[in-house]
């Protein structure tokens, strides 16, 4: 009798392998799964070699994350599982019963579990959920508060990426008759979680790795190091075409930095690939680069054992990120956003870095921010005041480029410089008018290990009653961080028809922007072209802005600022508000001037002048 069981087991294994090789794997429905069945799972514990483990079926947990969402519960056995428990990186490991594919190992009990109890996502639910639409939900985007800090960046991750929770919040949410390890089925349902995903972070300096690692860790990832064992991209010893049980990667950043998650392939149908058995972030339609992955070893841990792995070459694109699986196609990788950063410093030769960031309205801005901040943190000092000048552009397909030109100085200068680049990218990728494709970002960042700040202290005119139609020299005094007084002159052209009392406002860009917002002077863009125009008109930190303000009325019409409108025109616009967006203004800008400086200057002064008609 034992010999017969061994023969049948071998036959089932041969039939299963044959089915895999033929690409015609038969599937087992959840209704056919019974407690006591023994399945064969496949995953990589070391290198690229797929090994088998056993899955002893305990039962089926029904309605776990919604109607008709089921989870097959099994106790795993084999390989290192007795010492490690369920391993982070096993997500997607296929399980077969009698040669038929049941589903993917995808859930596990919480930390410190003594037994390798796992949840298996049924294969039918994986394939059904990933055939949904290509339209991204409006909420699947990042909302960042600028200027960025460690606290609000982490908060942005937590707010935007909040799928990771127990799939059953209350005991009554799931129904399971069998008890496991002294727990009733209902209790078991509240303890199961998606298996953690190892997060490869290669090339990140410790401070930035900790900042982003903490945010990702809250969302069900385990941050790890990058390449190891002497392998480089393209040199990893992969064995033939991709197959079920192979390790697979999801790349978010490539090039001189690498950041991405790793898991396991569940099923391949032609060029279609299914993996994980749970979401990466449940964002719906995506464009994640799909990569091979190499497993260096398994690290046992009472808290959470994990595969130490690394992503490899791009072999396709993950186009769906759903509640029960991620899925995509083998072939060319998706379009990414190329980013080039050149560092210029008086103390070192020019250095240039190249990154490829995932083209995604959520991860695109965050990964761009991480790449720039990491570059600055790796090659410039992280503590103490410093100064960064940012010059460059972001190319936008079918639109004008975004022009980047600003200066940042002080203790938070690296974060401010990185956020300055990320802000317009976030703004454009999350717009409600049309899908925007970035062709690339090219930056040159000059660095200095000293602050270059200044404070505006005084403005005046030598002639207190300037004449209409003449030029009046406006004197501006600002004091540098060293205490040096600098006086600059701005020629102010007084309009020929000006009379009476006028105001001269001299301000830094930030204060002027806030004042304009309070007075509703800032036009609200109504198209991508207007958004880019607004971005390119943005105020710079190293510039003082001068405005000559009169009492004539104006308006913002359909996103455009119109100053000094005649009363007759204002009357027509006021009487026909159905003709477009109309916002009246109670003063007019008669002239605008800019005063560039070599410092990040702050302050605001207003000077009232009386125009002489003689």
Image (spheres, helix red, strand yellow):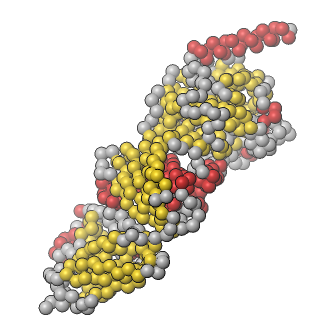
Asked if residue 375 is positioned above or below residue 310 in the image, the reply reads below
- Which of the 4 quarters of the picture holds residue 94? top right
Identified at 54% across, 54% down, the residue is: 379
Q: Residue 390: horizontal and vertical position, in percent?
A: 41, 59
Identified at 31% across, 58% down, the residue is: 533
Quadrant occupied by the C terminus: bottom left
Asked if residue 556 is positioned above or below residue 212 in the image, the reply reads below
State the residue in front, 318 or 355: 355
Q: Residue 372: horizontal and vertical position, in percent?
A: 49, 52
Asked if residue 422 is positioned above or below residue 108 in the image, the reply reads below
State the residue in front, 315 or 42: 315
Q: Residue 448: horizontal and vertical position, in percent?
A: 48, 63
State the residue in front, 375 or 286: 375
Identified at 31% across, 83% down, the residue is: 475
Left or right of 289? Residue 108 is right
Q: How many marks?
A: 0
Left or right of 587? Residue 103 is right
Q: Is residue 74 visible?
A: yes
- Which of the 4 quarters of the picture holds residue 248? top right
Identified at 63% across, 12% down, the residue is: 18
State the residue in front, 283 or 238: 238
């Amino acid at each position: 009798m034992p010999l017969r069981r061994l023969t049948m087991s071998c036959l089932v294994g041969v039939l299963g392998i044959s089915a895999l090789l033929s690409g015609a794997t038969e599937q087992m429905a959840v209704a056919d799964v019974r407690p006591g069945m023994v399945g064969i799972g496949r995953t990589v514990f070391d290198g690229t070699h797929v090994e088998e483990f056993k899955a002893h079926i305990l039962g089926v947990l029904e309605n776990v994350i919604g109607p008709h969402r089921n989870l097959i519960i099994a106790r795993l056995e084999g390989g290192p599982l007795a010492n490690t428990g369920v391993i982070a990186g096993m997500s997607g490991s296929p399980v077969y019963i009698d040669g038929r594919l049941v589903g993917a190992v995808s859930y596990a009990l919480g930390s410190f579990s003594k037994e390798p109890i796992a949840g298996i996502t049924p294969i039918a639910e994986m394939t059904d959920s990933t055939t949904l639409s290509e339209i991204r939900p409006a909420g699947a985007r990042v909302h960042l508060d600028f200027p960025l800090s460690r606290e609000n960046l982490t908060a942005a991750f937590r707010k935007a990426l909040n799928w990771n929770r127990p799939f059953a919040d209350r005991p009554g949410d799931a129904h399971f008759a069998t008890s496991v390890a002294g727990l009733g089925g209902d209790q078991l349902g509240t303890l199961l979680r998606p298996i953690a995903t190892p997060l490869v972070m290669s090339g990140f300096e410790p401070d930035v790795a900790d900042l982003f690692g903490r945010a990702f860790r809250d969302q069900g990832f385990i941050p790890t190091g990058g390449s190891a064992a002497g392998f480089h991209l393209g040199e990893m010893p992969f064995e033939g075409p991709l197959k079920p049980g192979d390790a697979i990667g999801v790349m978010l950043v490539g090039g001189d930095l690498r950041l991405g998650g790793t898991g396991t392939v569940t099923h391949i149908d032609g060029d279609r690939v299914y993996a994980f058995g749970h979401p990466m972030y449940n964002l719906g339609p995506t464009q994640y680069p799909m990569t091979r992955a190499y497993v260096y070893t398994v690290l046992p841990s009472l808290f959470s054992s994990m595969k130490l792995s690394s992503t490899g070459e791009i072999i396709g694109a993950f186009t769906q990120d759903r509640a029960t699986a991620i899925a995509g196609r083998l072939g060319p990788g998706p379009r990414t956003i190329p980013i080039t950063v050149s560092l210029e410093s008086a103390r070192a030769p020019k250095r240039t870095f190249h990154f490829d960031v995932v083209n995604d309205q959520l991860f695109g801005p965050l990964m761009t921010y991480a790449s720039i901040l990491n570059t600055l943190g790796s090659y410039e000092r992280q503590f103490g005041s410093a100064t960064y000048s940012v010059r460059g552009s972001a190319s936008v397909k079918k639109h004008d480029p975004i022009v980047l030109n600003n200066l940042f100085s002080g203790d938070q200068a690296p974060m401010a410089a990185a956020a300055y680049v990320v802000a317009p990218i976030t703004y454009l990728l999350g717009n409600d008018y049309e899908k925007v494709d970035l062709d690339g970002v090219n930056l040159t960042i000059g660095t200095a290990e000293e602050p270059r700040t200044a404070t505006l202290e005084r403005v005046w005119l030598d002639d207190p009653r300037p004449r209409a139609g003449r030029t009046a020299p406006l004197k501006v005094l600002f004091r540098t961080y060293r205490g040096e007084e600098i006086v600059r002159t701005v020629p102010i052209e007084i309009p020929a028809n000006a009379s009476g009392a006028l105001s001269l406002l001299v301000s830094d860009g930030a204060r002027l922007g806030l004042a304009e917002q309070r007075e509703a002077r800032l036009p609200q863009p109504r198209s991508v072209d207007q958004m880019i125009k607004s971005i390119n008109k943005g105020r710079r930190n190293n510039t003082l802005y001068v405005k000559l303000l009169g009492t004539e009325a104006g308006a913002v019409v359909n996103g455009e600022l119109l100053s000094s409108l005649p009363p007759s025109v204002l009357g027509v616009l006021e009487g026909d508000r159905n003709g477009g967006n109309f916002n009246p203004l109670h003063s007019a800008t008669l002239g605008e001037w800019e005063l560039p400086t070599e410092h990040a200057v702050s302050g605001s002064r207003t000077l009232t002048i009386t125009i002489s008609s003689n």
